[in-house]
Amino acid sequence: MIPLKLLVLGAQNTGKTALCVRFLTRRFIGEYDHKKEMIYRCTRVVDQESVDVEIMDVVWKESCAGSLEASIRWADGFLLLYSITQRRSFLEVTQLKALIDQTKQSLVVPTVLVANKADLELGREVTAEEGQRLAKDLRCAFRELSVAEAVLSVEAAVFQLIRLVMDHQRPLPDRRSYMLTVRHALTRKLTRSKTMQW
Ligand SMILES: Nc1nc2c(ncn2[C@@H]2O[C@H](COP(=O)(O)OP(=O)(O)OP(=O)(O)O)[C@@H](O)[C@H]2O)c(=O)[nH]1
């Protein structure tokens, strides 16, 4: 089976490695000393289906635009991270998403925007509402969480992305998002024709 490829992206110090390690081992390890790009491999059961997953953790300092684009081309889905204690990392998300859309040449790219370090409320520089608004603007799902404190939220975010990718890879008429669009269009049409009968 071809593995499903996820890329974790975000500014420096947002918790990218912490999130990968948390998802794979369920443990939170405070400090990491890895200087190379890493690809983690695992198998998870999603909706009764066994799925092979590869997760790439890009080391920010090393990633020049060219290699970042190569990593984006490699990936099927994206976890875009920022830290709620670092407004700069929040502002960088827009640029990263633009690079993803441009590289993928698509406006529908499975992406979950993750606002990390929710345990550091005292140092908060970005509100949850701002995160939600940005996610909507950039056509992403949104999760605010703490990799340090909540393993279940980390799993939920990654599983949400896996489902988005699986849905995206289905033939068009089988996609949940496609079906929803059709359903909404039909409902609108029905409502209009009922209004006309009155
Ligand atoms: N309080 C808190 N600290 C966190 C959380 N997630 C990560 N950290 C800390 O934030 C720092 C950066 O975490 P990393 O996982 O190395 O971040 P990174 O994005 O991979 O960093 P680069 O590899 O430099 O790009 C570390 O000191 C982590 O312990 C969190 O949810 N809460």
Image (tube, rainbow, N blue to C red):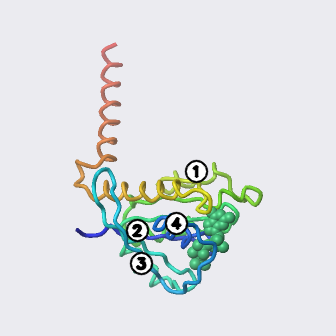
Q: At label 1, which amino acid type do we have?
A: Arg
Q: Secondary structure at mark 1?
A: helix
Q: Nearer the viewer, residue 126 or 6?
A: 6
Q: Is residue 191 positioned above or below 113 on the image?
A: above
Eye-nearest disc, 4 or 2: 4
Measuring 68% from the left and 57% from the top, which residue is drawn there?
119
Real-space CA distance between mark 4 and mark 2, rounded to the nearest whole angstrom: 15 Å
What residue is pinned by disc 1?
A: 133
Measuring 59% from the left and 59% from the top, which residue is drawn there?
115
Eye-nearest disc, 1 or 2: 2
Question: Would the CB of label 4 be found within 8 Å of ligand 1?
Answer: no
What residue is pinned by disc 2?
A: 6
Real-space CA distance between mark 2 and mark 3, rounded to the nearest whole angstrom: 9 Å
Badge 1 crowding class, 10 Å Cα cut-off, few under 14, some 14 to 19, many 20 or more, is few
Label at residue 39 = 3
Eye-nearest disc, 2 or 3: 3
Badge 4 crowding class, 10 Å Cα cut-off, few under 14, some 14 to 19, many 20 or more, is many
Is 175 left, or right, of 116 in this rendering? left
Q: Is residue 37 positioned above or below 183 on the image?
A: below
What residue is pinned by disc 4?
A: 22
Q: At label 4, which amino acid type do we have?
A: Arg
